[in-house]
Amino acid sequence: MNTSIDFSKMNGLVPAIVQDNTTNKVLMLGFMNEEALAKTEELGKVTFFSRTKNRLWTKGEESGNFLNVVSMTADCDNDTLLIKVNPVGPVCHTGSDTCWDETNTGEDVMFLKHLQDFIDKRKEEMPKGSYTTSLFERGTRTITQKVGEEAVETIIGAMANDDENFLYEGADLIYHLIVLLTHKGYRIEDLARELKKRHK
């Protein structure tokens, strides 16, 4: 983090709100000192200062239920952190998904954001043997061709009243459209914003 966190207000501690990056559910609240923040940045796993144990504590160090950091942001006063994570397993020591005994599930449509993030990472890393990588390597012509093919197959499924095939091909269409958006420097949220603008 580039922001300077103000640890002076609570005797060297700041609250750290942990939120699931995919579902947007608030998972837990903990406290960090400067050392815990540095350890979190180093490990990429949320590390708190335990007030009861009086030591650093990496969430999941015993259970394996780590909180893998996606992003960390300070609030407007630089004295509270919002940490977005990809959790591994339940978060609460009771075995619940969250410390408020909530089920950590979001709307299925939120998976599109997760898929977009995954495709962005593929474009950044370009791992060998990945189908998505091969699309990026072949460029605009191949990707647009795939979007067209999947659109036709979606239409065929709809016209044949083959719901299973219609949904399968529709999913392929959305996947390839996200790849095309990413290739052109956009994200699925850009289409959502366009639709939202039209809805007004």
Image: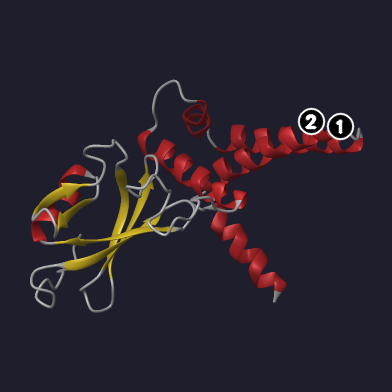
Mark 2: which amino acid? Asn
Q: Position of residue 135 (x, y in %)?
A: 53, 31
Whether 181 is drawn above or below 76: the answer is above
Q: Nearer the viewer, residue 198 or 35?
A: 35
Numbered mark located on residue 165 in the image: 2
- Residue linked to disc 1: 162
| 54 left or right of 124 in image | left
Q: Residue furthest top?
A: 129
| Quarter containing the N terminus | bottom left
What residue is at 23 percent from the left and 37 percent from the top?
62
Give the x, y percent position of residue 107: 59, 53
Q: CA distance from mark 2 to mark 1?
A: 5 Å
Q: In the rendered structure, which amino acid carries the disc numbered 1? A: Asp
User: In the rendered structure, are the residues bearing label 2 and label 1 in contact, judged by CB atoms less than 8 Å apart?
Assistant: yes
Percent position of residue 130, x then y? 47, 25
- Residue 188, percent from left and from top: 56, 53
**Vertical comparison of 86 with 156: above or below:** below
Q: Residue at x 83, y 35 (%)?
A: 163
* Quadrant occupied by the C terminus: bottom right
The residue at the far front in this view is 94
Q: Residues within 10 Å of mark 2 (few under 14, many from 20)?
A: some
Residue 38 relative to residue 138: left or right:
left
Q: Residue at x 21, y 74 (%)?
A: 78
